[in-house]
Image: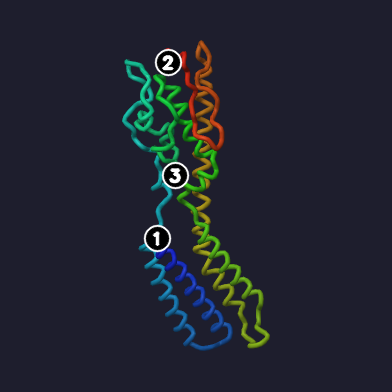
Amino acid sequence: MGILGFSFKVLGAVVGALACIVLGLGIQNGEGEDVWYGAAMMLVFAWGLAAAGASWHKRVPLLDSDVAERAGTRRFRPAKQRGWLPHEAWLDFPDPLPYTPDIIGDPAVDIPEGEVPPDENLRRLWLVRAKLAVHLDKREVRARARFRRGPTIALSAAGIAGGLVLALSGVDPETGENRTLAGLLVAAFLLWPFGRSLITHMEGLSLVARRENALRQEETRLMASDATRPAGPLGGDPVQPGTPYTPPRLSMYRGE
């Protein structure tokens, strides 16, 4: 139903733009009150199409997709009985940065390879790196993005451009009609979907960048803490772009 709803929205915008053309031509060329009536009927029809489309293609606030505040059932600080936990235990931990929105995350996938160490710092560090790996893979970010408004931006931008062409063309040399006002009304009408979609897209990019920056800062902090171990750091190398994060084996630390 989402595609059908979007199609209704597009059709409503087209009808609304045509109503602006009719109204603009009528006003500037003195075609009488019938033009106002016709344009009003077209705008009502456009509003009906847009309303129907909105009921099937609902706008979801970006923060409704935030998975960072997942509660989790385990604490990062180990219990008294220290020991390595199975790989599945990563799913039980909360997000390491719960107050920084994560709108492209998937808690069931964005976890490190291997088992969970009996160390709070390593648990946080490795989980942060696993989540950072997603943000470093730009193809994965694009695939997961829930804020893409490309079709709306492109279609409305094309309509605005067409309206401006009408406005700049001025008087039609064949019919003598002045099309300036019609073009300006079309461009102004389509600024709403264009601006709204562009703002949503930019807000999404901003939230993703904010999350990536926070993960980088947290990784740096945890690496500095890891470096203070008397026997040297255990955290291993930073995550490499384009690959899932695999922590070091740490055979000696595991007692193997």
Q: Residue furthest front?
A: 256
Structural distance between the alpha carbons of marks 3 and 2: 35 Å
135 vs 88: above or below: below
Disc ID at residue 2: 1
- Quadrant holding the N terminus: bottom left
The answer to whether any part of residue 234 appears in the image is yes
> Residue at position x 62%, y 85% from top?
177
112 vs 100, nearest the viewer: 112
Mark closer to the chain start, 3 or 2: 3
100 vs 117: above or below: below
Q: Are marks 3 and 2 in contact (CB under 8 Å)?
A: no
> Residue at position x 46%, y 16% from top?
251
Q: Are marks 1 and 3 in contact (CB under 8 Å)?
A: no
Local SS, label 2: loop
Structural distance between the alpha carbons of marks 1 and 3: 20 Å
Instruction: Please state the horizontal and vertical placement of residue 37, each as a whole percent of the image.
Output: 44, 84
In the picture of the structure, the residue carrying the numbered disc 2 is 254
Mark closer to the chain start, 1 or 2: 1
Instruction: Please state the horizontal and vertical placement of residue 247, each as a whole percent of the image.
Output: 48, 25
The answer to whether any part of residue 214 appears in the image is no
Q: Residues within 10 Å of mark 3 (few under 14, many from 20)?
A: many
**Viewer-side label of 3, 2:** 2
> Residue at position x 47%, y 35% from top?
131
Structural distance between the alpha carbons of marks 1 and 2: 51 Å
Disc ID at residue 150: none
Mark closer to the chain start, 1 or 3: 1
In the picture of the structure, the residue carrying the numbered disc 3 is 103
